[in-house]
Image (cartoon, rainbow, N blue to C red):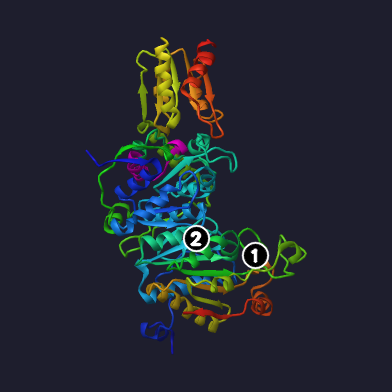
Amino acid sequence: MDVKDIIKPENLVYKKSSVLTDNVMHFCPGCTHGVVHKVVAEVIEEMGIQEKTIGVSPVGCAVLAYNYLHIDWQEAAHGRAPAVATALNRLYPEKYIFTYQGDGDLASIGAAEIIHASNRGENITVIFINNAIYGMTGGQMAPTTLEGMVTSTSPYGRDVKLAGYPLKITELIAQLPGACYVTRESAETAPAVRKLKKAVQKAFENTGKKKGTSFIEVVSTCNSGWKLSPVDSNKWMKENMFPFYPLGTLKDE
Amino acid sequence: MGELRLMKGNEVIAEAAIRCGCDGYFGYPITPQSEVMETLMARKPWEETGMIVVQAESEIAAINMVYGGAGAGKKVMTSSSSPGISLKQEGLTYIAGAELPCLVVNVVRGGPGLGTIQPSQSDYFQAVKGGGHGDYKLIVLAPNSVQEMNDFVDLGFELAFKYRNPVMILSDGVIGQMMEKVELSEYKPRMTDEYIVEKYGSWATTGKPKTRERNIVTSLELDPARQEKFNQKLQKKYAEIREKEARFENFKTEDAEYLIVAYGSSSRISKKSVELLREKGIKVGLLRPITLFPFPEKELLRLSKQVKGILSVEMSAGQMVEDVKLAVNCSIPVEHYGRFGGMIPSPDDIVTALEQQIIGGK
């Protein structure tokens, strides 16, 4: 088979989602944000809901998510994305509203907003990237930072006597009657990405059916913040993050 | 003639919101303004006009809900009182930075801190000087009657959408809690989603159709040169607002030799003081700023050429007095008189203050 055959349209096996822009992503090499963005874009395209979807981006590494997906976006103050999404959901109940937040944004400064939006059963999808660190500000300790984990504000490792315990906010959300679907996924391998995509699709479908809050945690890496190569980060994540943040669906009603 | 009712100022805010076609109210209980949300919940406007009402988990969440609704082109508002308004400052600076229209009502109580639930005017600086971080301004309307609580809701939204800027109604516990006769506004229909797309489609996040680029509501600009340009654009907008939107009321200033400047409930008390002073043969007038930003500085400058001295009367330790001094370039004596911490001056207190601080001090 020569090149001419390979590039024939009928032999096309993969192409970039039309919902993704051509902007060069600012994420570090090895970061899973880009993969998760791609998954969200593909689901929006495949469901044909581009015109009805409004995204709410966080403060953190994903603050510029609006540069990468061809949909309307609102950039929220730190942690407040679920409040912004609440108003969008109430005022445009036929639209697909989702937030995209990191662990500092969602589990620390925005803990009240995510718990109460989920408890009200706001008809939204929440994509929660948990890499156990504040990435954008340079690798500080997050509420989800593991015990003993070294960050720039826990340079001797997280001491739970000083800093409290890593917060399993996803388990908290799963307790709330307003949350209809709560799952913990990852994006470090092709099968994991395929599984994540199914979860994102289910969440958006729930939004379409007005079922309540759908919450997807994506256990992720931060090789810059963790000071590890992308390969070593994935290894560290599997060995340390997965045991504490076990993958799987916590709730599906 | 519209429908006449005897109502509390706070209740009227709710009624006026429904009648002017407001799409959403987001609030959190705090004294002395809780009647706003209570009235809305009792009225159930979602069954009547389709307006939604949400009791948020905090003032912070409420103002960020306002951000979300405003970003999508809807007519949205919140109300609170001083400590709650402090919590809303983060949201307000984001709203100003994203150039979104919205209405915020502050029924001011005494501070600092948890302070008192009694009326005060000690949030003037916070309201007119920005309040949150960054170079920005709110348009600030200061009602002095229950009627103006009604009228300024519609006016506030009109100005908010005209300039894509947050508007604050700076009321206080007196105006919020007192009952007066009020002529309610006629009902205006809410904007349809199609109208919002047509009118605000260039910026509102209503869902991206194939016919336009995506809309992004944000206050983030990482390039300082572009951020400076954006700030210059904001300053140009504020200059236009200064030029066109200053509102004020003159009371017996035609022949005045002395001037009282007061807004909100202080201006109601000061009107009585003007009459008492005139009974004593002292020619005093009152200038009432109706907009606090923009401040009626031109009118003050004009009056400063006519009067011998100005008493700025506020229920604060002296905040608006700084703007009065700036407006008249300290060309004549300007003094402050205030009660604060929830205390209200009597008309006689103001009479004595003018006699001692202005006339006695000349």
Type of residue at label 2? Ala
The verdict on residue A9 being magenta is no
Relative height, residue A5 to residue B106 (above, below): below
Is the residue under label 1 in contact with that under label 2 (CB below 8 Å)?
no
Residue at image mark 1: A143
What range is drawn magenta here? B150-174
Relative height, residue A131 to residue B317 (above, below): below
- Residue A170 is tagged as none
Q: How many neighbours does mark 1 have within 10 angstroms: few (below 14), some (14-19), or many (20 or more)?
A: many
* Residue A244 placement (x, y as % from top left): 66, 76
Is A9 left or right of A24, judged from the image as shown?
Answer: left
Sequence order check, earlier mark of 2 and 1: 2
Type of residue at label 1? Pro
> Element under label 2?
helix
- Residue A81 is tagged as 2
* Residue B246 placement (x, y as % from top left): 38, 31
**To which quarter of the image does residue A157 belong?**
bottom right
Give the residue at the far bottom of this rendering.
A1
* Residue B105 placement (x, y as % from top left): 43, 43
